[in-house]
Amino acid sequence: MSAPQVGVHESRTDAYLALLVNNSSSDNNISTSSRTVREVSYQDWGRSANFTRAQGAERLDYRLFVSDDETEHPTAHIVAQIGTDGTEGVPGFVHGGLTSTLADTAMGNLAWHAGYKAFTANLNVDFRAPLSPPACVVVDAKIEKTEGRKVYLSADVFEVQEMQDGTLARSNDVVAEATSLFIVMDKAKETAVTTPDTAPQNGASTPRVTNDDIRDHTSTCVASVRETLFSPGWSTIEKDYLKTVWAST
Ligand SMILES: CCCCCCCC/C=C\CCCCCCCC(=O)SCCNC(=O)CCNC(=O)[C@H](O)C(C)(C)COP(=O)(O)OP(=O)(O)OC[C@H]1O[C@@H](n2cnc3c(N)ncnc32)[C@H](O)[C@@H]1OP(=O)(O)O
């Protein structure tokens, strides 16, 4: 596999914002779009956040954003920091289920925020490149089409890397590509499902996120990744172990 190519942005703020949108330009995969996204605060997710937050920030921490664009299909974006504690499948590599969960979460929340009270009926994930923890990833989710109660979505997962000059860029190589079919719940069964306790009404209590917020979170994400990378950690030991295993087969 060839080394991931990364694009570099001269403007730091643009680069952070570009991590959250997915309009590829011809020469690299960094967007210059000024699309506005707003953060869906963790408190506003209600109980639906319990599963993915159960691991704690040292294992998995992420923030969810939805586009604030009423003229076209909304999009959702996750910036996630994947730690080294309990995130592996094959030792040294992020568990595919974790990557899948991030994609499902981005698509599911996008569906709900677009007004579809829907469940995942089908989820397909193509894992295109291995991911080693600690890692920082961006997930871009969009609605492909809707047919009656069926909502078809897709999500791409990219790794975020820090360039030598300190700028951030997403890798051109996609880590995983997911597609899904969500089914809007049957009206008759709807009453059986309680909406999240603290779900915002029409997004009213959802705060707008600024570029500074995005930068701060992404900085924390990358700083944490850097810290773990440069300290002799469990992950490094496991990778060495894996090399030994491979060498002996
Ligand atoms: C301002 C707004 C604020 C909002 C605040 C938001 C707060 C956040 C809130 C929420 C965020 C959520 C984020 C979470 C993300 C993760 C999501 C999950 O984890 S979801 C849990 C896992 N999934 C399940 O548990 C489903 C289990 N399956 C079922 O319950 C049923 O199978 C269901 C509901 C999916 C469908 O059952 P039926 O009885 O309602 O419908 P039938 O008649 O079977 O299907 C309807 C049509 O769909 C097709 N279909 C159904 N399943 C299919 C499949 N797997 N593949 C292909 N087609 C399928 C069928 O063939 C049928 O098509 P034909 O109408 O005949 O053309």
Image (tube, rainbow, N blue to C red):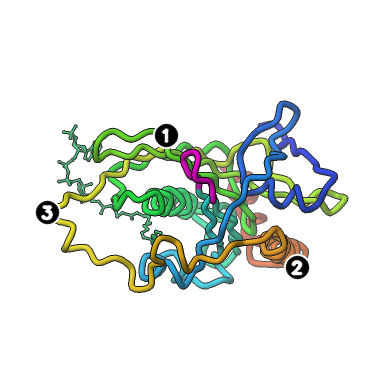
User: Measured along the vertical axis of the image, is residue 116 above or below residue 82?
Assistant: above
**Which numbered circle lies on residue 16?**
none
Q: Which residue is mark 3?
A: 188
Which numbered disc, 1 or 3, marks the residue that appears first in the sequence? 1
Disc 1 residue type (three-letter) = Glu
Q: Which residue is mark 2?
A: 231
The residue range painted magenta reads 68-75
Q: Main secondary structure of the magenta part?
A: loop
Instruction: Say whether mark 1 is within 8 Å of ligand 1.
Output: no
Residue 72 falls within the magenta-colored stretch: yes
- Distance from the alpha carbon under mark 3 to that under mark 2: 55 Å
Residue 214 falls within the magenta-colored stretch: no
Provide residue 135's location: percent of width, then percent of height: 64, 55
Q: Residues within 10 Å of mark 2 (few under 14, many from 20)?
A: few
Q: Quadrant of the C terminus?
A: top right
Q: Nearer the viewer, mark 2 or mark 1?
A: 1
- Identify the residue shown where x is 85% and y is 44%: 10
- Identify the residue shown where x is 41% and y is 50%: 104
Residue 236 seen from this side: no
User: Measured along the vertical axis of the image, is residue 193 above or below residue 107?
Assistant: below
Q: Which residue is mark 1?
A: 144
**Which secondary structure lies at badge 3?**
helix
